[in-house]
Amino acid sequence: MSSPRRLLVKVLPWVTAAWVLVELVSLRLGLLNAFFYDASHAEVQGIDYFSLPKAFLNLATGRSMYDTFGQPTYGPHATWYLSHPALAVWLGSWLSAFEPMTSYGVYTMLSLAMMAGCAWVLARESDDALVRRMVWLLVMGSFPTYWMLFVGNVQALLVLALGMLLAGVFALTYKGRGEGLVLGGLVLSLLTKPVVLLMLPLLLMLKETRRAAWRALGIYAVVSVAFEVVPFLNPEGIGLKQVAWLAVHPAVVRETMNIYANHLQVNAWMKDNSVHWLNLVAQSDMRMMHVDVFSLPVFVDTVVGARVAGWVYALPMVVALGLSVLVARMKDARVRMEAALLLLMTISLVFFLGYPTVWEYQYTSVLPVAAVLLVVQGRGVFYERARGWMFGLAACAWLPSLYVFTEGRALTAEVVTVIRLDRVVPVTLLFGVMVVMVGRAALDRRSADTVR
């Protein structure tokens, strides 16, 4: 090992620890707040967190977990609770025993522990000491990570879930193990934020991951149905017949169940636990032209000054599903799993390109992708020539947005576009490069024959 590498191996753990300490101190003193618009223009610390213990307290008194704004309140402010109802029971139950700000502090440390868990499961797949230390800094020290801690969002659970899932598929590809990690990652995501739903078709088609995917779906179905049909768990339920009717009337859902269009008023339909799923429909066509929103639909609409047709943003999902079929049909098992790993990373980015409401802290879910692109170095993957470019694009998620260079300026369309630039553009380019790499491998005659 060269002298500079030895030095980095020794120094990086200290750099990571020091930076995490800066993040924690900044939560009290605001050292990093200049990099975020809301830190200077609104009171939002812990705002995404307080709805979690509030949800359990509601349930304990026979009220809907999703009636976040009903009395009595918990904490100084809150955004609407939207996670899976099970999360309020297994996590919100014991966190609600603390005073609000103490509870927020406890959850902050828990979030850091989950981010550390993500770094650990990914870093251990590398045999390179320097890569392992870089993964830790990448996951623990990003600016979106700090903002996630600041607002107290449960996003750390999703980051851990994605880390487990990708580490599991990586291990299945190169070491013949990892099914338990795939199962754990799927269940954790499904019972918090179900971003992995679009990955399930691919995972169900691959023989290496099929069993874990079916088990995860079984657990998800049983738990979800219980939280819909058991009265104690859904105290203000509207009945399966009404839920089924809403499910096949998306226009009604968008018109009546959008929390922003309703001015933060929660109606009777929105108090049923099914709102966790129906909200995806309710907000699917709403583009909030706000400085805090970092989605491709809002970015493009701001740049062109007009509303682009919604079907355009559905194309990444269609492409992902089409590639899932092609990858599952690849003949060579090793290349098929390598392509599947890259495709799973690609699918994890569809959210940023297709869903209109994306907050800055959600870019933490790009960090596991960047980490895998580090760990996979030298494994002989078909996309090795493009790996450096892909890592560079993914690593942009670590950086602050360009807001710091626009402080004090009026939020014109041009200024807001600059703020979003190094968030939206890199992830969009990354998706495009990954699609090309997966597509080329899947269409290669030597590997795309049907598996017999």
Image (spheres, rainbow, N blue to C red):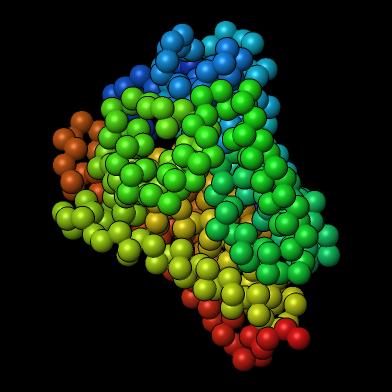
Q: In the displayed structure, would residue 272 be above or below residue 26?
A: below
The residue at 35%/33% (across/down) is 259
The residue at 49%/75% (across/down) is 436
Q: Nearer the viewer, residue 131 or 147?
A: 147
Which percent across, then down, holds residue 67?
Answer: 45, 22
The residue at 68%/69% (across/down) is 205
Q: In the displayed structure, would residue 109 be above or below residue 274?
A: above
Q: In the displayed structure, would residue 110 be above or below residue 317?
A: above
Q: Nearer the viewer, residue 111 or 57?
A: 57
The residue at 26%/56% (across/down) is 300
Left or right of 329 in this view: 238 = left
**Does residue 446 appear in the picture of this structure?**
yes
Looking at the rendered image, the quarter that the C terminus falls into is bottom right
Which percent across, then down, holds residue 319?
Answer: 47, 70
Q: Nearer the viewer, residue 81 or 415?
A: 81
Left or right of 319 in this view: 213 = right
Which percent across, then down, holds residue 40?
Answer: 31, 24
Which percent across, then down, holds residue 120?
Answer: 72, 44
